[in-house]
Image: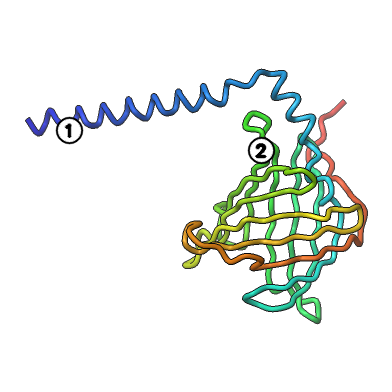
């Protein structure tokens, strides 16, 4: 009897997984090609304000005041932006640095992000949406550390030469939040720029 039950349970589990996968595919397939194209055209430039070079000051509930540099480039193909965020000391020494790839997913109508820190892989993932004149992000950080956290980030007061940033942090899976855990004020020090093809096609 036991030998019969186990295969049946496994089969039921596989069928359930297949149905869930099918429903997910159907849900994502409800949008037409025209809708997907319209979303792409409407949102491909949502993060264009970040392109270029910035100097920033920050206030952290954990580390106090700080400063650093932030640079972002548009990649050659599609709505994809690569940026580097670097916190520095008074002598310019690096205290912390991370790189983030931001790519717009027109099928799901959302930006998707993944950040990389030295030696921790690609675990810090998140999503972003434009809300009015602001950009809102929810992203995990420190996933491979003993103290992972979830952040709710808001870019606001976005102008050609400046923007403001605030992040709320949760260390218990989103049950409770510390508001304004980190605040950033950024000022432009370099113009928007793009990264050309790494392997250009031959004519």
Along the viewing direction, whichever of 173 and 40 lies nearer the viewer? 173
Count of labels in the image = 2
What residue would you read off at disc 1? 6
Is the Cβ of the residue at disc 2 closer than 8 Å to that at disc 1? no
Residue for point 81% across, 30% down: 201
Query: SS for tag 1?
Result: helix
Q: Quadrant of residue 116?
A: bottom right
**What's the coloring here?**
rainbow
- The location of residue 78, given as percent across then percent down, is 76, 34
Q: Position of residue 182 (x, y in %)?
A: 68, 67
- Image-based side of 20 in relation to 169, left or right: left
Q: Residue at x 62, y 56 (%)?
A: 152
Q: Quadrant of residue 202?
A: top right
The C terminus appears in which quarter of the rendering? top right
Residue shown at 37%/30% (left/top)? 17
The crowding category of the residue bearing disc 2, from other C-alpha atoms within 10 Å (few below 14, some 14 to 19, many at least 20), is some
Label 2 element class = strand
């Amino acid at each position: 009897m036991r030998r019969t039950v186990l295969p049946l349970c496994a089969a039921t589990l596989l069928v359930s997984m297949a149905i869930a996968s099918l429903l997910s595919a159907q849900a994502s397939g409800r949008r037409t090609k025209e809708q997907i194209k319209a979303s792409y055209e409407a949102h491909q430039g949502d993060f264009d304000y970040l392109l270029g070079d910035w100097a920033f000051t920050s206030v952290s509930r954990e580390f106090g005041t700080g400063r650093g540099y932030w640079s972002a480039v548009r990649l050659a193909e599609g709505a994809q932006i690569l940026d580097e965020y670097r916190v520095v000391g008074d002598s310019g020494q690096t205290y912390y640095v991370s790189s983030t790839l931001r790519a717009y997913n027109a099928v799901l109508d959302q930006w998707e992000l993944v950040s990389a820190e030295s030696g921790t892989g690609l675990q810090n993932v998140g999503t972003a949406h434009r809300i009015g004149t602001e950009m809102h992000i929810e992203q995990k950080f420190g996933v491979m550390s003993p103290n992972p956290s979830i952040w709710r980030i808001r870019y606001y007061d976005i102008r050609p030469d400046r923007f403001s940033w605030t992040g709320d942090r949760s260390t218990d899976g989103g049950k409770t939040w510390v508001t304004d855990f980190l605040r950033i004020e950024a000022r432009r020090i370099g113009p928007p720029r793009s990264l050309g093809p790494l392997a250009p096609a031959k004519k």
